[in-house]
Image: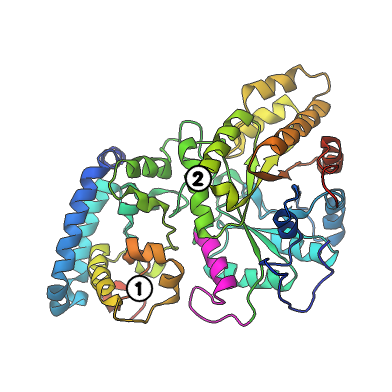
Amino acid sequence: MYRIRLFAIRHSRSFEWIYKRLESAMIALDPVLAKIGYDRVERPVAFVEKCVKTVLFDCKMCGQCVLSSTGMSCPMNCPKQLRNGPCGGVRPGGFCEVKPEMKCVWALAWDGASRMKGGAQIHTVLPPVERNLEGSSSWLRVSREKAAHLREAREKRRTAIADAFPGARANEPSAAPLAEEPAQAVKGSK
Amino acid sequence: MDHTLPQPYSAPPEGHVSHSRLERVLRSGRFAITAELNPPDSADPADVYEAARPLGEVADAINATDASGANCHMSSIGISALLTRAGYSPVYQISCRDRNRIAIQGDVLGAAAMGVSNVLCLTGDGVGVGDQPGAKPVFDFDSLSLLRTIKTMRDERRFLSGRTIKNPPQLFLGAAENPCIPPYDWRPERLAKKVEAGAEYIQTNYIYDVPLFEKFMARVRDLGLDKKVYILAGVGPLASARAARWMRSNVPGIHVPDAVIDRMEKAEKPGQEGKKICIELIQQMREISGVSGVHVMAYRKEHEVSEIIRESGILASRKR
């Protein structure tokens, strides 16, 4: 898995392209998904997403995927789960402070981002992970959020967290979500 | 020093975000000095004051570490509160390792109410290097989301939940940087991101490799960051070649070049040599454009700090 993860980061540019296409498709699907009910599709989509992303990126299903902002290197593989860059403990050769046998997730992220078209997104400050969204589908969230983002111009209502991290809200709206969450996506909401 | 506290809540001076002496010194263009306090394994306030005395003579602010190296000592908020009572200006260090967003936001208000006017936002060393490696690492925030959160509390007067804060915490916001470890090329970019998140001053980790640091600073100047953030270079006296080697391999994020270790090895009195190297480093830092001060971390050598600062001659160039 680690080697596939490294492969994905080496080919960050291609994966960025694939992700952009997937994202467009998901946004286009928003009305359909809304009609079927996001609540109904949440579990099956989350299952598929988990299978695909675990193989490719060692995904931890944080539910707030920011791969496009992290050079396709999943920040949840950082033992400190840092979302904004490497800590001050990186070992000589760029190895992890906590897991010395692993390359620093963030050293790889910056490397991956340098090959990506939208690599500059790595400079945007990301908010802390909302832990109650763990295990839910980030793809569906992107679909909802990007669609909501389009409506946002009309809507004045913003939550404080999205306000405090405006860059993140624009680049990775699923990291600072505004749209209504379906009950299935949020832990302890029933 | 600042003022003996608790004081009534009042607005900071014009053009300032806090009542911090460190902020005043930096904004007035004087070369700032901060020093790290070795936290006691004790519940006696006298132990804190004893540790603070040799630092307070020369430092504009005293850093209260937050279980650095993941080793348990008196808490940074406790030390900070004691220091403000005695008229010292503390830097309240907050590590993301041990507390979640609920605890940290509450502590920030508590610290500010106790007269704390400087904070330093840190990721924190992993629990594995500390004396209780079985502890649960939290890392709810990272240093950047923590910076942005405190900035939101201060400037927007609200918690991350959106709830309003009646009187916001007036804090001078700091972060750390470690210029001498990988990924070298991205360290200045990361500094830019910290400034973007809200950092107003930076205290770096130990710097023993001056050429590497100068390269970092050149890039920092290219990015125009030296105009946006005050950078305090981290220095400290080494005790011996053996201690330096131990630090290099056991403490995360410390880079000591072989040349420095060689010099310690060859010295007749390693303690004296360590002090001399530290003084030379301070003098070199003074000359680097974009460096606004030094942060002295003299672990178990706190008594030498005022002597080091005086001998370095940096006090002579500023009116106190």
Image location (x, y in percent) of residue A30: 17, 72
Q: Residues within 10 Å of mark 2 (few under 14, many from 20)?
A: some
Query: Which residues fall within the magenta stretch?
Result: B145-166
Residue in the foreground of this view, choosing between A178 and B1: B1
Residue in the foreground of this view, choosing between A103 and A13: A13
Which mark's residue is nearer the viewer, 1 or 2? 2
Q: Chain of mark 2?
A: B
User: Looking at the picture, do discs 1 and 2 lie on one chain?
Assistant: no
Q: Which residue appears at 30% of the width and 78% of the height?
A: A180
- Within the image, what quadrant is residue A66 found in? bottom left
Q: Which residue is mark 2?
A: B223
Q: Specify the label residue A187 is tagged with.
A: 1
The amino acid type of the residue labelled 2 equals Leu
Q: Which residue appears at 71% of the width and 30% of the height?
A: B243
Q: Which residue appears at 61% of the width and 36% of the height?
A: B254
Image location (x, y in percent) of residue A128: 45, 63
In the image, B292: left or right of B142?
right
In the image, A73: left or right of B29?
left
Locate the C terminus of chain A by quadrant: bottom left
Check the image and report above or below for B82 versus B192: below
Q: Dot 2 lies on which element?
A: loop
Check the image and report above or below for B111 versus B75: below
Question: Is residue B255 visible in this depiction of the protein?
Answer: yes
Question: Is residue A98 visible in this depiction of the protein?
Answer: no
Check the image and report above or below for A14 versus B80: above
Image location (x, y in percent) of residue A157: 37, 82
